[in-house]
Image: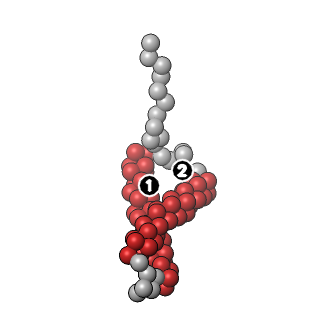
Amino acid sequence: MNKKLNTILFMLGGTILNIFLMLAFFLVLLFGANIVITPETAPTVKMLIFLLVIVLSVVGAFLVYSKIIKWVSGKWDLEKTMHPLFGKRGKKD
């Protein structure tokens, strides 16, 4: 396989991993919020808790994903087998 194909496959796998992590964080946090929320809880508080669950799931997934990518990149030295996403730009006069 060439470097561009490796890069595309890595990005596709990373995207799937990130979506899975976000879904897992969302479900765990939603389950936790469901324990905290009672039928007497005000609708605005329910909405704020749900918004907090969404934000925390995105942030948590990003943090875990970045740690996993750094670990994988260091373990298998992916810079040798992948095409750079952003190339160097030369100065234009």
Where is residue 31 shown, x and y percent of the image? 46, 81
Number of other residues with Cα within 10 Å of mark 1, as a class: few under 14, some 14 to 19, many 20 or more: some
The residue at the point 52 percent across, 64 percent down is 60
SS at mark 1 in the image: helix
Where is residue 71 shown, x and y percent of the image? 60, 58
Residue 47, placed above or below residue 10? below
Whether label 2 touches label 1, CB < 8 Å? yes
Q: Residue tagged by mark 2? A: 78
Position of 80 with respect to 86 (left or right) is: right
Of mark 2 and mark 1, the one earlier in the sequence is: 1
Residue 53, placed above or below residue 42? above
Q: How far apart, in angstroms, are the residues tagged by discs 2 and 1?
A: 10 Å
The residue at the point 42 percent across, 53 percent down is 11
**Near-viewer residue (82 or 21):** 21
Where is residue 16 shown, x and y percent of the image? 40, 63
Where is residue 48 shown, x and y percent of the image? 44, 69
